[in-house]
Image (cartoon, helix red, strand yellow):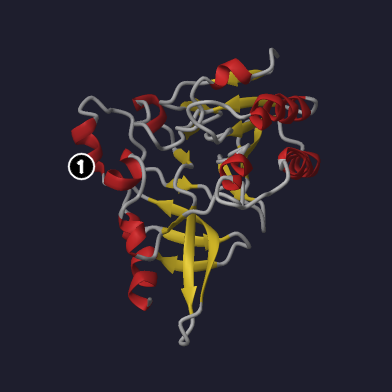
Amino acid sequence: MCEINPIIGEPAAIVENRERTLVIADIHLGIEVELSGFGLHIPNQTEKLLNRILKYILDSKPDRMVILGDLKHNIPLASRIEEYGLPELLNGILKHTMIDIIPGNHDGKIGDLLPAHKNITLHGVEGAVIDGVGYFHGHAWPSEEVLGAEHLMMGHNHPVIQFADKFGYTLHRRVWIRAKCNFDLLKAHYPTLKDWHDPYCTIMPAFNELCGGITFNTKQGEDLLGPMSSHILLIDEAEVYLLDGTSIGKIGDIKREQ
């Protein structure tokens, strides 16, 4: 039986089925180049990102790793950090496990940057079913095959929740979102959809903490990115979990409390 188990305290998950799969989303390698344009000068983060991933791999010993979109950051052109850092990152991972990449909206022409290796697979933007789970980034409609899976996982929106005290001070925390789909709206877009298991769709937190995110329990959360999250997912009924595993209720309830 397929299980999705977030790594406690981390924006990563282990999927257990016939294989063990490590899943992360939104690495955004090279985002420090864009931040430097705003006066935020941050050192190259490639080694730091790789070391975090390698710790997950050494702890969990996965059979494969799925990178769920936005492996790189800068568009339309790649920065020097991405040109040199992306092969470094992937080659470091490939020493331990195979890699499946689901491209995101920041991953245009990423195939030109990938190392030539038999254990790396670049899928299409419509996603892929890997060991029973339907993976897609979220900026494009997933395929019917993906929607036919019993579990769905996506990235793209970098979900965070805002907490506020009575003095008006606020803080933001990355979270996991677990939502059902509005099948009637989904069927309108996929009139020939046959295999449907009413799956939960897990929206993953961004791996790179420099990314920022969309605050799901404020008005900003009413304008989510991508066709599935903005039109199909039942966001107000979605369950929210902090990275440490704490359940903090449903989005609609948290909005009312705010």
Residue 257's quadrant in the figure? bottom left
Residue 21 appearing in the image: yes
* Viewer-proximal residue among 196 and 50: 50
- Where does residue 161 sit, x and y in percent of width and height? 47, 64
Left or right, 6 with reference to 134: right
For the point 48% across and 42% down, the residue is 155
Left or right, 159 with reference to 97: left
Looking at the image, residue 167 lies above or below residue 151: below
Residue 52's quadrant in the figure? top right
For the point 43% across and 33% down, the residue is 149
| Element under disc 1 | helix
- Where does residue 141 sit, x and y in percent of width and height? 34, 31
For the point 48% across and 26% down, the residue is 128
Q: Which residue is mark 1?
A: 184
Q: Indicate the quadrant containing the C terminus: top left, top right, bottom left or bottom right.
A: bottom left
- Where does residue 234 sit, x and y in percent of width and height? 31, 53
- Where does residue 136 sit, x and y in percent of width and height? 45, 33
Judge the density around disc 1: few (<14), some (14-19), many (≥20) Cα neighbours within 10 Å. Answer: few
Q: Indicate the quadrant containing the N terminus: top left, top right, bottom left or bottom right.
A: top right
Residue 27 appearing in the image: no
Amino acid, disc 1:
Asp
* Viewer-proximal residue among 221 and 190: 221
What is the number of callouts on the image?
1
Left or right, 23 with reference to 172: right
Looking at the image, residue 122 lies above or below residue 153: above
| Residue furthest out toward the bottom | 166
Left or right, 53 with reference to 238: right
For the point 57% across and 17% down, the residue is 111
